Image: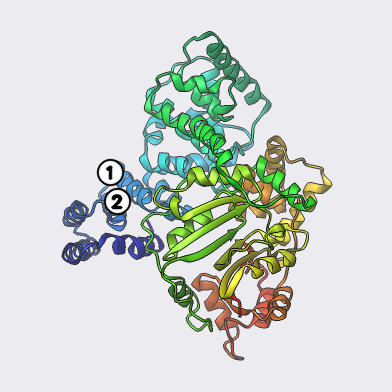
Amino acid sequence: MNRKQRRATTKLGSRASATSSDPGEQISQLFSEAASQERARKFDDAVRTYKRVLALDANHAEACNNLGRVLQAQGKTKDASLYYVRSLALMPQLLEQYAEICATLFSLQPRLAEAIRRQAAAWPQRLPLNDLLGGDLDAIATDPLFLHLLQSAPVRDVAFERLLTAIRHSLLRVTAAGLPVSGQQVSFACALARQCFINEYVFAITSQENEEFSLVRDVIANALASGAAIEPMQLAAFAMYAPLHSVPSAAALLERKWTPAVDELLDQHVRDHLRERDLRDSILRLTPIDDEVSQRVRRQYEENPYPRWVHAAGQVVPTSIDRYLREQFPTGAFTPLNKNENLDVLVAGCGTGQIAVASAQKYLGARVLALDLSLTSLCYAKRSTPRDVAPRIEYAQADILKLAPLERRFDMIDSSGVLHHMADPFEGWRILLSLLRPGGLMHVGLYSEAGRRDVWAARKFIADRRFGTTPDEIRRCRQKLLETPLGSVVRFTDFFTTSECRDLLFHVQEARLNIPMLKAFIAKHGLTFLGFEFGLPVLQQYRSHFASSGWAWTDLDRWHAFEGENPNTFSGMYQFWIQKP
């Protein structure tokens, strides 16, 4: 994997492995020795030394990654793939570097990259498996990195999506025709079905596929009703097009014995669904939800919990909120909280819990209250929260607009991607500020009008053509957008799952904001603006832009001018921190 990934594993993996001074020192020395051998292209020596590191610390993510890289250089692609997977399993946050991981996969499996190009050229025709992969399906379908990627994150590339769409159709046709399949093909179909569940069946579907799917669906329904046998491939094929919990009497599937791949599929499709249903009564209802806009937003997220995520970050070394902000804003003027324990955090609009979990992992002493309108989202969050983090997070259903009477106060509030879904974002912001202790810190994420111009053009396209918000309509709309210049919205990862695409392009309520509006609110309430969160390249570009006339990270007028000339600067959101006086 690339240099950026290696830096990430260095920062978290190596620090996490040094649990005591002597073993930690030995591991560090061996790792340095192995890295030196790798640079000198002494690959046999490097392999032995990296394995010595892993013998001392089996969870050393960077050693796993580097060992995979060395083995790949030696042409041992299957072993390399296994170690890459081990690194990703230890640090799932590396999956955010999706394009780089795909590049690694394609270098391991060049035939897969060629199949992507071939299918992209043929689209919308779905090429059969032989035309795409020849006789290499089993070799490619058993690649550990490919399988892990399918089961861990939504596909985030249109060409890759189209290849998987074609493969899915081929596997469905084989199943509908009752043709024999290998155990490896069944396992791969299960992995692809798990991908389709993660992306909520966003792949395009033809009328022929619907007919073939209906045949498989009826076979399964009749078999469950009669007690007849069901072929594992039939279940996998169904699950590539719809969740298995939608099968009548789906719980009866759990009473049968299956292969490990099918049983894992049932975990995702049926057991997790039942767990989430059982959690509904355990979620605290903190406030009523009677505001008209809040009710419409809640309905959307009850139908499409957002976002879908699979794995929480691993090997995170918690740090104090003061140190975190000092690293983010080295020249920022903020007053330290001096709290390394009992840090009261409110996540206002937690969705499916990803930010709440990240906050509990990241900040020393964090105790999190995570609120959302959607009970379905909260159940997803509670079911997905890692056991070691769960005691420090309380989930509750509430409307931000009804929180003013709440007696509890917080050291930090995170409200990212939430306030702009209110009729008046600033009313919600004012209420949250009233819950923040004096000197408290707040992280806010709000949509930029300039940064989302293509999104608003796409929303107009959708409104003009009267696309609905059903999964079928969202699938159809995505394909139509890809035929136009508005296909530029694929730059948003949200385009690649049904719930996230609905959030991106079909939201029932969305406000457009700009930096002068933020500046006016911040000034009116006497808040201290600490800075925008950015990667180093954008900060360097901003600094260079104003090098001749002076610059400051907290100069909102300069940032407004910079955005005017670089409108995609805040294409995600304005992500920034403020401090209450």
Q: Name the quadrant of the N terminus.
A: bottom left
Which residue was labeled with disc 2?
68
Q: Work out whether residue 427 or residue 24 is closer to the camera in this orientation and state it.
A: 427
Say if 175 sits above or below 30 in the image: above
Which residue was labeled with disc 1?
79
In the picture, residue 263 is in which quadrant?
top left
User: Do callouts 1 and 2 mark residues in contact (Cβ within 8 Å)?
Assistant: yes
Residue 581 seen anywhere in this rendered image of the structure:
yes
Give coordinates of residue 435: x percent, y percent: 62, 67
In the picture, residue 300 is in which quadrant?
top right
Q: Describe the element under mark 2 as helix, strand or loop.
A: helix
Please state if 363 lies on the left or on the right of 502 as rendered: left
Say if 490 sits above or below 376 in the image: below
Q: Residue at x 66, y 29 (%)?
A: 206
Residue 577 seen anywhere in this rendered image of the structure:
no
Q: Name the quadrant of the C terminus.
A: bottom right
Give coordinates of residue 77: x percent, y percent: 31, 44
Number of other residues with Cα within 10 Å of mark 2, as a class: few under 14, some 14 to 19, many 20 or more: many
Say if 33 sits above or below 67 in the image: below
Q: What's the residue type where badge 2 is placed?
A: Gly
Say if 527 sits above or below 446 in the image: below
Q: What's the residue type where badge 1 is placed?
A: Asp
Q: Work out whether residue 290 or residue 156 is closer to the camera in this orientation and state it.
A: 290
Give coordinates of residue 499: x percent, y percent: 63, 44
Please state if 513 lies on the left or on the right of 379 as rendered: right
Q: Work out whether residue 302 or residue 573 is closer to the camera in this orientation and state it.
A: 302
- Residue found at the far right of this picture: 464
